Amino acid sequence: MVFEKAETKMDVARLAKVMKALASQKRVELYLEIVKKSEAGFKAEGECFIMEIIGSLNIGAPTISHHLKELANADLITTERRGKYLIAKVNEKTIKDATSMLQIRGHKT
């Protein structure tokens, strides 16, 4: 099943994958930290250096690595290694598509 709205197209399986990735409290916290750093930073293209947020999450690097993989697999973020630094970038299209699909629309009775 595929829902379409103007420029938005997301199937139910992809939406379920996004929701599954955000089903973990720690993963949501990590995602929101990436969003916050991306918006607040002066770095080009809304990038977040993962080293900048590790201390604020109170979880170990291996766990963060696992959560980053899950967020990337759901296409919520993209990651890139630059030398010894790992950089994450929010995929705004995925969130926009998921939000659009979840909006409750009036229906005829």
Image: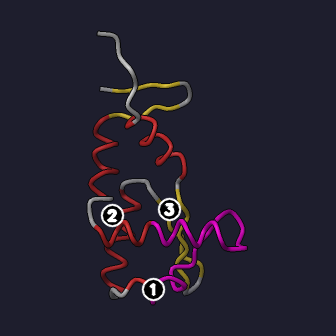
Q: Amino acid at mark 1?
A: Ser
Q: Which residue is mark 1?
A: 56
Q: In front: mark 3 or mark 1?
A: 1
Determine whether the residue tagged by mark 1 lies in a helix, strand or loop: helix
Q: Seen in the image, is 77 located left or right of residue 66?
A: right
Looking at the image, residue 72 lies above or below residue 94: below
Q: Nearer the viewer, residue 52 or 72?
A: 52
Determine whether the residue tagged by mark 2 lies in a helix, strand or loop: helix
Marks 3,1: beta carbons within 8 A: no
Tell me the distance, in whole angstroms, between the alpha carbons under discs 2 and 1: 19 Å
Residue that appears at 34% across and 68% down = 27
Q: Residues within 10 Å of mark 2 (few under 14, many from 20)?
A: some
Q: Which residue is mark 2?
A: 70
Q: Residues within 10 Å of mark 3 (few under 14, many from 20)?
A: some
Looking at the image, residue 99 lies above or below residue 9: below
Tell me the distance, in whole angstroms, between the alpha carbons under discs 3 and 2: 11 Å
Q: In front: mark 2 or mark 1?
A: 1
Q: Nearer the viewer, residue 85 or 53?
A: 53
Q: Position of residue 58 (x, y in %)?
A: 36, 87
Task: Name the dominant secondary structure of the magenta segment.
Answer: helix
